[in-house]
Each structure stands twice: as structure tokens, then as C-alpha cells.
Image (tube, rainbow, N blue to C red):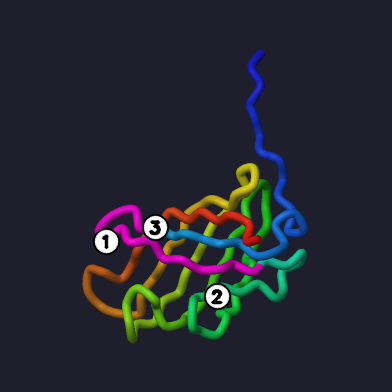
Amino acid sequence: MTETATAAPISLADVAGRWNVVATPVSGDTTPTLYVLTATADTTGWTIGFPNRDPIPTRVVSVAGDSIVLTAGPFESVRRRGVQVTTHSILRREGDRLVGTTHATYATTGADTALTLRTEGTRAP
């Protein structure tokens, strides 16, 4: 008989606090985007903070298994000045980090309407 390892269920209380996040595109211009994710012990009050900007409200879409699904926007992109973006992130806790993937969808036409980023957060001091 084989056993399948399963990740422990995630709790919002376990991730409540401030996280320094680095989101790096998986291809193309791999310059990372830095921000602070502020998480609460429930689904309200989550925000993304970029330097010199007002906090961006972030909605907890679901908490299931080992994952938290977040969405934010539309808001002005820090990567593409003047372009609105909506982000959809799937994060899980690995030890003392939050890791996952963020998909950015830009309100523009053409081939560059989407971007996938590897996302990693560490607790802010």
C-alpha cells in the first residue's frame, strides 16, 4: 500500500500579517514586481501595497485545501504605465513562505494581454 502525502489545510489566521512579495514573470522581461500583501485572519481587509500608491483592495475568492485564491483590480499596472490590470493569484504556504502563481490580465488589445508570474512572499518584519 502506498501513502499519498497531502498538504495541511491552510488557515487565514496562519497567514495573517504583512508579506513582502516578489512576483517574477515566467518569460519575457523577468524584472520582478515588489509589493506588500496585507492579510487578515478573515476574508475582509486584504490589500496589496505598491510603493507611493494607495493600497489596492484584494478579495479572497476562496480558501480550500492548501490554497488561497485572491483577485485584485482593475488598477493601474506598475509594469505598464497607464494600463489597467486585474490579477488572479493562487497562493499556498510552504514553511515560512507564501508561494504560487499570479495571472495578470491587461485591459489592452494585442498579443500582450496576459502575464504569468511566479509569486513568493516572506513575512515582513
Residue 12's place in the image compared with 99, above or below, is: below
Q: Which residue is mark 2?
A: 49
Q: Give the CA separation, mark 3 to mark 1.
A: 9 Å
Q: Which residue is mark 3?
A: 24
Within 10 Å of disc 2 (Cα), the crowding (few <14, some 14-19, many 20+) is: some
Position of the C terminus by quadrant? bottom right
Looking at the picture, how far across and down is residue 74, in whole percent? 47, 81
Label annotation for residue 95: none
Specify the quadrant of the image occupied by residue 103: bottom left
Residue placed at 73% from the left, 59% from the top? 12
Residue placed at 53% from the left, 74% from the top? 72
Position of the N terminus by quadrant? top right
| Farthest residue, direction left | 110
Residue placed at 76% from the left, 67% from the top? 42
Looking at the picture, how far across and down is residue 76, in whole percent? 42, 83
* Magenta stretch bounds: 25-38
Within 10 Å of disc 3 (Cα), the crowding (few <14, some 14-19, many 20+) is: many
Q: Which residue is mark 1?
A: 29
Taking the magenta stretch, the answer to whether it contains residue 26 is yes
